[in-house]
Image (spheres, rainbow, N blue to C red):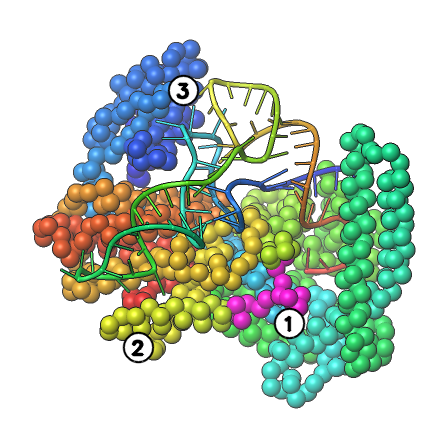
Amino acid sequence: MSILQTLKSRFASALSSLTDDTAPLIEMIRSSQDPKFGDFQANCAMPLAKQLGKSPRDIAAEIVSHLDISDLCETPKIAGPGFINLRLRDDWIADRISQIAGDDRLGVVSVSNPKHVVVDFSSPNVAKPMHVGHLRSSVIGDAICRTLRFAGHKVTSDNHIGDWGTQFGMIIYGYRNFLNAADYRVDQVAELARLYKLVNQLSDYHAVKSKLPELSKQLQQRQAELDDLNSGTAPADKKAKKKLKAQRKAVEDTRGAIGSAEAKVAEVEADAALMQQANEHGDIARLARQETSKLHAGDEANQKLWDEFLPACMAALNQVYSRLDVQFDLTLGESYYNPMLAGVVSDLKSKSLATDSNGATCVFIDGNEAPFIIQKTDGAYTYATTDLATIQYRRNELNADEIVYVVDKRQSEHFSLLFRTCELWGFADVKCQHVSFGTVMGNDGKPFKTRSGDNVGLGSLIDEAVSRARRVVDENDDRREQPALSPNERARVAQIVGTGGIKYADLHHNRDSDYVFDWDKMLATTGDTATYMQYAYARICGIFRELDVDRQNIGNGRSTVLLTCPEERSLALQLTQFDYAIDAVLADYRPNQLTSWLFDTSGKFSAFYAHCSVKNAESPELQNSRLILCDLMARALSTGLALLGIETADVM
RNA sequence: GCGCCCGUAGCUCAGCUGGAUAGAGCAGCGGACUUCUAAUCCGCAGGUCAAAGGUUCGAAUCCUUUCGGGCGUACCA
């Protein structure tokens, strides 16, 4: 039983003589936020006093008098309005550490009721290079999978790749019209990406070009409306003010739209070759869409191209996954569900859940204006249809108890419609959850792009991180009198530090927050970073090397842990609470709960390291005790970081 | 129009179902390497938690309003 659970059960019996409803009260026991108040605090006296019409401090005293915790805590202190402050006995902490020291799971018990959770994450479109946006989903999803597995659940990680969408028609069209055969032979994926970009650019050109006159007209009109509003007297009431502001924004938006449209047009027109291609392919957007339709309809030639493109695209994705050490149990892309889509639509129709609206087949959910479109006017299915088929498959074929979607929060409306539709469809028994995350922003407050407006490729991000890490590794090792690392080891450390840094930079934010991308922060190796913890790990390994200790034998004996100074006690107490961090992550799928525990713990270790020498411990018993703490700390770091997909190195 | 989200230190962000004097990191300033790796440690400074009301013994957290910003909103995924 964990410390908190033990405390709660003791409080439950103490409280039972005062009230029948102890459940909400024992939830008010938690760890103290300030160590000067002790290790834990119970805040239940105040509400209970209110309930019983007595003074909170008297109630607190009464609770304490019924409380039987002398075996694990020192005498409770009542403070402030009626807080009960608890300080654990050192011998109790020491006992607890001894137990955990012999436990591979560091005191975390496997769940008693394992669930089968399908985690849907990463989900890039093939033939489009992965970018920072995919980093969040991949890294968060991977951490969730690892943590669920550690807790004892059955996990199926599934990469629901976009291999059946509009972009394939564009690539097919590009392949047929603009292929550079030589480049294609050298680097198939790069050439496909170029073709995708080109077709996209050309269809954009035409779309935007034809929209420009309308946009200018709209601008004129909106400007006129704005002038109209401005010409009157200054707006007195709030409504008029608001309207004026909205109008200003509308004008600005239109102006912005024209600006970017003109830029797109100019880019094509500045390039004679592009211009010629644009002129020769005036209907490119429609024709590309047609290729997609043909593919979906089973057209042999297009299917053959799809079969040709896909393996190379997958290989490119897998290369990135391998560098990130992200693994999938399944990679069932959208194409996999294609045969099931017609059945989904007919089933929903037969159950009168889906109806025709303006020629499209839709599910309408009460309280939502927007329909959930499962079949378009032209007969094509949408990603909504695919998502429904996917849930059906995961429930019926994979026997999932729970499905977790690690997807951008901008799609929250889609998921709420999807999940609601599934409930109505009769799939209420599978728990679906949208684990949303915020956008990676640039310095301008807009979604992060390079200066040229492209997405930042994930491959080059990793390269940059590793090469920066290498510079730091070199600097540090060169500074030593005797360099500790061979060139190969340096490369290995740079790899671990670089990729760990990227992952950590993402994971340590609350996933729902947008955050500003910054190379220096993303790749920083000081402060609240993976490097800080990796370094702590390497320092512990250094102690074992220096003292020539066999880690296998530490903590196996009955040797006790001695807590002789505040740094030791604080570290030991922290190390008993790994299970809270795991619980906190899984409560709402927030890996930042684990990063913050790891950072706190590492901070306490660093203080311990600075103040409590292991090598020069005052006695062999104390040295042994400190070795137990070091070993436990090292395992906490490697285990905890591993749950985040971050590796450690013995020397760095 | 409708719906969802956000506003916390110079910057980037934590802050769990309401708990005591709101926390980190970075940047800044000042200290600590003959002693297990200074990728570190110790200290200082930095805040009207956007604003105003309300609920409560207690509010950054819950409710209402205002201001500022973002996102979504019928055939892209």
- Helix, strand or loop for disc 3: helix
Q: Chain of mark 1?
A: A
Whole-percent x, y for residue A391 in the image: 61, 53
Mark 1, residue position: A127
Residue type, numbered disc 3: Met
The mark nearer the N terminus, 1 or 2, is 1
Residue type, numbered disc 2: Ser
Q: Chain of mark 2?
A: A
Mark 3, residue position: A46
The mark nearer the N terminus, 2 or 3, is 3
Is disc 1 in contact with disc 2, using a CB cutoff of under 8 Å?
no
Mark 2, residue position: A486
Q: Nearer the viewer, residue A417 or B5?
A: B5
Q: Chain of mark 3?
A: A
- Apparent side of residue A478 relative to residue A365 in the rendered image (left or right): left
- Span shown in magenta: A447-461
- Apparent side of residue A5 relative to residue A93 in the rendered image (left or right): right
How far apart in space, not on screen, are marks 2 and 3 (Cα)?
A: 62 Å
| Residue closest to the far left | A619
Whole-percent x, y for residue A643 in the image: 40, 56
Main secondary structure found in the magenta portion = loop
How far apart in space, not on screen, are marks 1 and 3 (Cα)?
A: 61 Å
Quarter in which the C terminus of chain A is drawn: bottom left
Residue type, numbered disc 1: Ala
Mark 1, Cα crowd under 10 Å, few <14 / some 14-19 / many 20+, is: many
Whole-percent x, y for residue A528 in the image: 41, 53
Q: Nearer the viewer, residue A10 or A213?
A: A213
Quarter in which the N terminus of chain A is drawn: top left
Total labels: the figure holds: 3
